Amino acid sequence: MNDEMDSWINLTRTNAAGYEHANGGGDCQTFAWGSRDNNVNFANSDEVSSWRTNRGC
């Protein structure tokens, strides 16, 4: 499902991050703890290829 993310939810108590390229490279988007985005902005839509869950950008 590479580069097909158009929404996200983070129900944890820690920021997470999504990256444009594999292995945490390229543009980074922070997924703030306790929040969601049901329709990612067109500039960032379908961009995420990798992510981490231990902190934001």
Image (cartoon, rainbow, N blue to C red):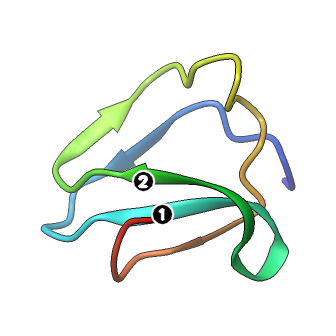
Q: Position of residue 19 (x, y in %)?
A: 67, 61
Q: Position of residue 29 (x, y in %)?
A: 52, 50
Is disc 1 in contact with disc 2, using a CB cutoff of under 8 Å? yes
Quadrant where the C terminus sits is bottom left
Amino acid identity at mark 1: Ala
On residue 30, the disc is: 2
Q: Measuring 41% from the left and 76% from the top, which residue is drawn there?
A: 53
Left or right, residue 30 beside residue 51? left
Quadrant in the picture for residue 49: bottom right
Amino acid identity at mark 2: Thr
Q: Which residue is mark 1?
A: 17
Q: Measuring 72% from the left and 52% from the top, which residue is drawn there?
A: 48
Q: Nearer the viewer, residue 47 or 4?
A: 47
Q: Position of residue 47 (x, y in %)?
A: 77, 43
Mark 1 surroundings within 10 Å by alpha-carbon count, few (fewer than 14), some (14 through 19), many (20 or more): some
Left or right, residue 45 beside residue 3? left
Q: Measuring 37% from the left and 66% from the top, which residue is drawn there?
A: 56
Cα gap from disc 1 to disc 2, whole angstroms: 4 Å
Q: Position of residue 8 (x, y in %)?
A: 47, 42
Quadrant in the picture for residue 4: top right
Q: Secondary structure at mark 1?
A: strand
Quadrant in the picture for residue 40: top right
